[in-house]
Image: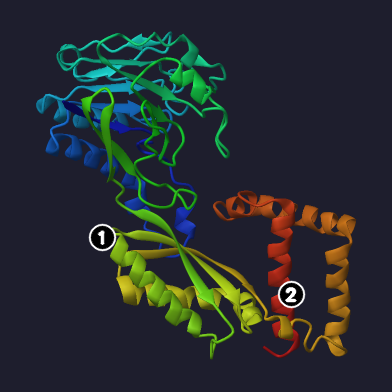
C-alpha cells in the first residue's frame, strides 16, 4: 500500500492586474495566495506521510521577475526532502522550458521530467513501492501535437502513472495544448493519469483513473469553489481511492439572491443576501471569501436596482462587513432581475418616455443599428483601465453584452424620467 498527492497548476507568483482599482480588494492576500497554497500542499504531504508528490505542470505562472520565486519553491521541496518524500514535476504551457529563462538547482528529491521526450522517473523509492511514473514536460508554450502517443508502454507488475499537461481534445475555454483523446490514454494501460492544465477538478474515468486535480488556488471569479489536490491511496492496482483536500487560502464564490413579487421593499434584497451569505460563511470554514453577487428573480424594484447599482453595491458590502467582518470581499454585483409581466409597459405612454421608448425599440429590432452602437461601445471599452475592460470582454457574446447594456440603460432612463 502507498499514497501520493496529485496536484497541478500552482501558478506560484501569478501576477494580479488592476485589483487595486476594486474597493476593498484583499490585494495582499490574493497576491500571496498561490505561495500559501503551495505551503499547504507541503504541509499536507508531510502530515499525511505520503510516499511522493506529483505536480502536473504550471508550477510557475511564467518567467520569474527575480530568483525569489525559485528560492521559495526550493525551500518547499527541501521540506519534503527532510520528510523523505520525493516529488516529480512536469512543465506545462505557463512554465515551459522556453518560458523560464532563470534556473536554480533543485533539491535531489525533485525529479523534473524531460521536455525532449517522455521518460520514466528514476528514484529508489519508486522501485521499492512498485510504481512507474511516466511523463514529459513542455519544451515551449504552444505544444499542439499529441505527445501522449509516445509515452512508454505500461511496465508489467507495477502501478503505472502517467503525468500529462493537456486540454484533452479541447476543453471549452482552454487553449488546446497537447491534445489527445480519452481513448489515447486508456490504450496505454496505465493505472492512473495525473492531468494538469484544466483548473476545474474532475474525474474523467475510473479504473483506470484519469483525473484533473484542478488548480490549488482560485485566481479570479471564473475559478469558483474549493481548490486543492487529490490524495490518492493505492491498496492494489484496482483498489484506488481519492480524497479531495482543499488548499486554497481565499475562495471565490457566487452568491445567488433570488427575489420575487412578495418583496415589500427594495431593501428586501439586503435581508436575503444576509441569509445567503451566512450559508456560505458556514460552508467555507472561516476561509476568506471573494464573492460575486447574482441578484435574480422577478421584482417590481427591477428598475430601481439597475438605475443605482453603486448604491446597492455599497449597501451589500455593508451587510458583508456586518456578517463576516474582514472575511468577505464583494468583487461585483450583477442584477439579472426582470419586471413582473403586469408591470412591463406600464406608464410608457406619452410624455418624454414616448420618444425614448421609440429609440430603444429601434435598438431592439434594427440589427444593423445595434451593431453600430456596439462598435462605439467597443471603442470605449478599449480605453477603460484593467480589470474593468476585461469584465466587458470575457464571457459574453455580443448579443449578451447588448442585452446587459440595454437593460441598465432602460432602467436608468425609466427612473430619471419618472423623477427617481
Horizontal side of residue 212 vs 337, given as left or right: left
Horizontal side of residue 282 vs 386, given as left or right: left
- Label 2: which residue? 410
Instruction: Look at the numbered disc 1 and give the secondary structure of its residue.
Output: loop
Q: Nearer the viewer, residue 389 or 174?
A: 174
Mark count = 2
State the image coordinates of residue 100 (x, y, percent, origin top left). Answer: 41, 22
Viewport quadrant of the N terminus: top left
The answer to whether residue 206 is visible is: yes
The answer to whether residue 91 is visible is: no
> Quarter of the image holding residue 371?
bottom right
Foreground disc of the pair 2, 1: 1
Instruction: Look at the numbered disc 2 and give the secondary structure of its residue.
Output: helix
- Residue at left 18%, top 11%? 127
Vertical relation: 59 (above or below) 326: above
State the image coordinates of residue 256 (x, y, percent, origin top left). Answer: 48, 67
Horizontal side of residue 383 vs 214, given as left or right: right
Q: Which mark is residue 285?
A: 1
Q: Residues within 10 Å of mark 1 (few under 14, many from 20)?
A: few
Q: Earlier in the sequence, mark 2 or mark 1?
A: 1
Visual colour scheme = rainbow
State the image coordinates of residue 145 (x, y, percent, origin top left). Answer: 56, 16
Q: Gap in Å between the C-alphas at discs 2 and 1?
A: 41 Å
- Residue at left 13%, top 39%? 47
> Quarter of the image holding residue 8?
top left
Amino acid at each position: 500500500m502507498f499514497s501520493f498527492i496529485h496536484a497541478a497548476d500552482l501558478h506560484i507568483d501569478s501576477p494580479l492586474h488592476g485589483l487595486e482599482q476594486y474597493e476593498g480588494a484583499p490585494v495582499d492576500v490574493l497576491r500571496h495566495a498561490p505561495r500559501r497554497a503551495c505551503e499547504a500542499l507541503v504541509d499536507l504531504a508531510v502530515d499525511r506521510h505520503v510516499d511522493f508528490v506529483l505536480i502536473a505542470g504550471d508550477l510557475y505562472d511564467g518567467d520569474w521577475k527575480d530568483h525569489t520565486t525559485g528560492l521559495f519553491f526550493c525551500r518547499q521541496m527541501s521540506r519534503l526532502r527532510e520528510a523523505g518524500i520525493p516529488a516529480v514535476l512536469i512543465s506545462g504551457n505557463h512554465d515551459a522550458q522556453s518560458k523560464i529563462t532563470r534556473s536554480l538547482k533543485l533539491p535531489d528529491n525533485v525529479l523534473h521530467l524531460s521536455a525532449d521526450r517522455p521518460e520514466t522517473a528514476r528514484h529508489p523509492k519508486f522501485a521499492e513501492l512498485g510504481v512507474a511514473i511516466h511523463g514529459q514536460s513542455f519544451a515551449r508554450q504552444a505544444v499542439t501535437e499529441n505527445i501522449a502517443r509516445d509515452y512508454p508502454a505500461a511496465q508489467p507488475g507495477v502501478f503505472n502513472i502517467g503525468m500529462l499537461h493537456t486540454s484533452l481534445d479541447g476543453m471549452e475555454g482552454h487553449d488546446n495544448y497537447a491534445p489527445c483523446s480519452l481513448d489515447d490514454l486508456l490504450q496505454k494501460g496505465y493505472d492512473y493519469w495525473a492531468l494538469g492544465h484544466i483548473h476545474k477538478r474532475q474525474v474523467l474515468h475510473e479504473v483506470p483513473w484519469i483525473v484533473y486535480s484542478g488548480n490549488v488556488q482560485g485566481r479570479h471569479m471564473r475559478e469558483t469553489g474549493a481548490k486543492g489536490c487529490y490524495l490518492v491511496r493505492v491498496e492494489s492496482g484496482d483498489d484506488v481511492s481519492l480524497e479531495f483536500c482543499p488548499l486554497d487560502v481565499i475562495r471565490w464564490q457566487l452568491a445567488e439572491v433570488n427575489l420575487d413579487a412578495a418583496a415589500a421593499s427594495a431593501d428586501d434584497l439586503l435581508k436575503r443576501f444576509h441569509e445567503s451569505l451566512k450559508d456560505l460563511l458556514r460552508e467555507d470554514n472561516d476561509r476568506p471569501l471573494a464573492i460575486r453577487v447574482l441578484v435574480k428573480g422577478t421584482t417590481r424594484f427591477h428598475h430601481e436596482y439597475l438605475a443605482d447599482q453603486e448604491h446597492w453595491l455599497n449597501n451589500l458590502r455593508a451587510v458583508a462587513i456586518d456578517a463576516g467582518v474582514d472575511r468577505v470581499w464583494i468583487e461585483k454585483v450583477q442584477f439579472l432581475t426582470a419586471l413582473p409581466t403586469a408591470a412591463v409597459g406600464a406608464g410608457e405612454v406619452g410624455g418624454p418616455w414616448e420618444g425614448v421608448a421609440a429609440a430603444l425599440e429601434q435598438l431592439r429590432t434594427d440589427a444593423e443599428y445595434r451593431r453600430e452602437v456596439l462598435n462605439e461601445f467597443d471603442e470605449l471599452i478599449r480605453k477603460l483601465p484593467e480589470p474593468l475592460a476585461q469584465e466587458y470582454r470575457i464571457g459574453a457574446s455580443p448579443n449578451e453584452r447588448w442585452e446587459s447594456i440595454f437593460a441598465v440603460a432602460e432602467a436608468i432612463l425609466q427612473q430619471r424620467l419618472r423623477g427617481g
